[in-house]
Amino acid sequence: MVEKISKISSPMLAATLKDVTQLDYSKGYLATQKLDGIRALMVDGKLVSRT
């Protein structure tokens, strides 16, 4: 159960994980989509990227 959700203000960068079975899904996870090799979010009407 998620207790507090913060507004995502910039695209997230995924960490490297060798063994997916080590994830503890009971804590919950946030993720953003990556489309066509570009990771960006629309924040307050503006496109925001990591670069």
Image (cartoon, rainbow, N blue to C red):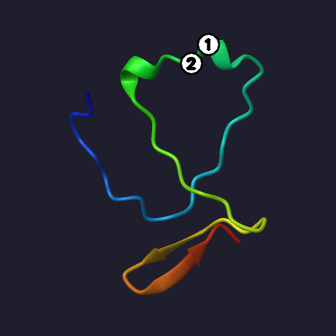
Element at label 2: loop
22 left or right, relative to 30: right
Q: Do the residues under discs 1 and 2 have CB atoms within 8 angstroms? A: yes
Disc sitting over residue 38 in the figure? none
Check disc 1 and report the residue beneath it.
Answer: 22
> Which residue, given by chain and number where applicable, does mark 2 sit on?
23
Q: Residue at x 76, y 68 (%)?
A: 36
* Position in image of residue 30 (x %, y %): 46, 43
Which residue type does callout 2 highlight?
A: Leu
Query: How far across and down, in percent of the image, does residue 39 sit?
Result: 66, 65
From the viewer's perspective, tell me whether residue 10 is left or right of residue 17.
Answer: left
> Does 11 appear above or below 25?
below
Residue 13 placement (x, y as % from top left): 64, 50
Residue appearing at x 74%, y 32% in the figure: 16
- Circle 2 Cα neighbour tier, 10 Å, few/some/many (<14 / 14–19 / ≥20): few
The secondary structure type at the circle numbered 1 is: helix
Outermost residue to the bottom: 45
Q: Which amino acid does label 1 sit on?
A: Gln
Q: Quadrant of residue 50?
A: bottom right
User: Does residue 32 lie above or below 20 as drawn?
Assistant: below
Residue at image position (56%, 61%) is: 11
Q: Which residue lies furthest to the top in this view?
A: 22
Identify the residue at image location x=68%, y=37%: 15
27 or 50: nearer the eye? 27
The quadrant in which the C terminus is found is bottom right
